[in-house]
Amino acid sequence: MNSPPPAATSNAHPPCLVLGIESQIGVAVVRELGRAGVRVIGLASRPNSVGLSSRYLERGIVVGPKRDAQLIATLHRLGEELGDAVLLAVSEADLSWLIAHRDQLGRIRAIAPPEDAFRRVLDKRLTLETAAGLGLHVPRGFSAATLDEWHAAAAQVRYPAVVKWADPITAIPVLRAHGIAWEKLEYARDEAALRRIGERFQAAGIWPLIQEYCPGRGLGQFFYLHKGEVLRRFQHLRIAEWPPEGGFSSVCDAVPLSRHRELQEQSIALLKAIGWEGCAMVEYRLDEATGDAVLMEINGRFWGSFPLAVHAGAGFALLAYQVQGCGVVPALPAVREDLRCRMVSTEVKRLVRLLLQPGRIADPFFRRQPLQEVRRFFTDFLRPRVRYYLWRSDDAGPFFADLRNYALRLLRR
């Protein structure tokens, strides 16, 4: 158990439970709430979860990885002990579980989006169909229900092609049951490669989406919607990703809200059409040479680069707690738009791939710039406007816990 910081001793607000403190996302949620004076109780899946080391936790509880009747019983006991309390979750899987069980949690108020809107966001096909109907640029794609349909699509798509799952939460257990590894993204350079990818899934009887390749960087636009009104917006541009050809941000820059205004309004229209409530990230692939932005997906949760939004003062987790948890719409300060945020351990992995393992970069159009990447990696340490996903001088515990976990993983290998 951690000793709470002085700011966390206030009893003016109900406590907040945070489910899923294994990553930088959960740590950032804990810090944002704790620094605002909210009593935070962290619910961890593993004893080595980095969030357990945060000084902004009043208490950390290891509940294990299962989401079952035992967790419901634990939440009931916490409700009896704490009184009315708010519960935030980090992952899509946990949000899905909360939506299904939020009426069974006693005095714990689970904050989650409307069920129908969440299902539409989870299913990328439905998201893209809705977006196309609103005039947003979406990638040309194909879906298949049989191997024959997959082969037919392989004969029509433009190459290279990208393969991704429309609904990973549904697909992962089916693939696991058939001993098939789940990949977030795969690339096919030609028809033969795409046919081989599709044949891997024949035993499971389900197939991912096939989409045209879209060049550019990841542009994330973030919003907090309440009863159809936008209370907060923020956006960032991915400077570096892991894996290098596309995945999640290892380095990202805040982007002034004066930029991409029309695209922001299109994103908001899409979220309203879906019926969204709360936090969401609308992700695009931005071709900086042409200015064209292609919609990739919506993340209906706190996102991987969430620490940047916390450093910038956007307050998305605090908004969820205050608005949906306490029924209070607060006055909002201006956000900083001049910050960069980075995950150094992920950057190191990225440099190893770029310098020593270029053959493992799946994107055939990815342009390696090793010298520029190395120079940026080191000069970022000297820039005063750079912040970090895990390191904070006032809360160093999660950073050192991450180093410990990394060292233990290396020893096991």
Image (cartoon, rainbow, N blue to C red):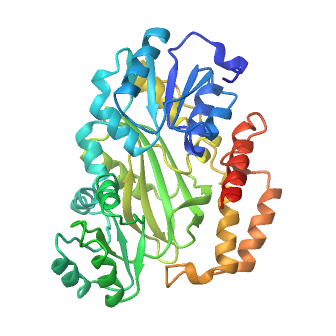
Residue 32 appears at what percent x and percent y? 60, 32
Look at the image and tell me in which quarter the C terminus lies: bottom right
Q: In the picture, residue 178 is in which quadrant? A: bottom left
Residue 244 visible somewhere in the drawing: yes
In this view, 197 is above or below 405: below
Counting from the top left corner in percent of width and height, residue 386 is at 73, 52
**Which residue is at 50% across, 79% downward?**
362
Residue 227 sits above or below residue 361 on the image: above
Determine the image quadrant of residue 211: bottom left
> In the visual, does 122 lie left or right of 64?
left
Asked if residue 11 lies left or right of residue 168, the reply is right
Classify 6 as above or below 52.
above
Residue 310 lies, in percent from the top left, at 60, 40
**Above-or-below relation of 351 to 405:** below
Q: How many marks?
A: 0
Front residue of 216/67: it is 67
255 or 171, nearer to the observer: 171
Q: Residue at x 16, y 73 (%)?
A: 146
Q: Quadrant of residue 8?
A: top right
Q: Residue at x 63, y 42 (%)?
A: 312
- Residue 257 seen in the current view: no
Q: Quadrant of the N terminus?
A: top right
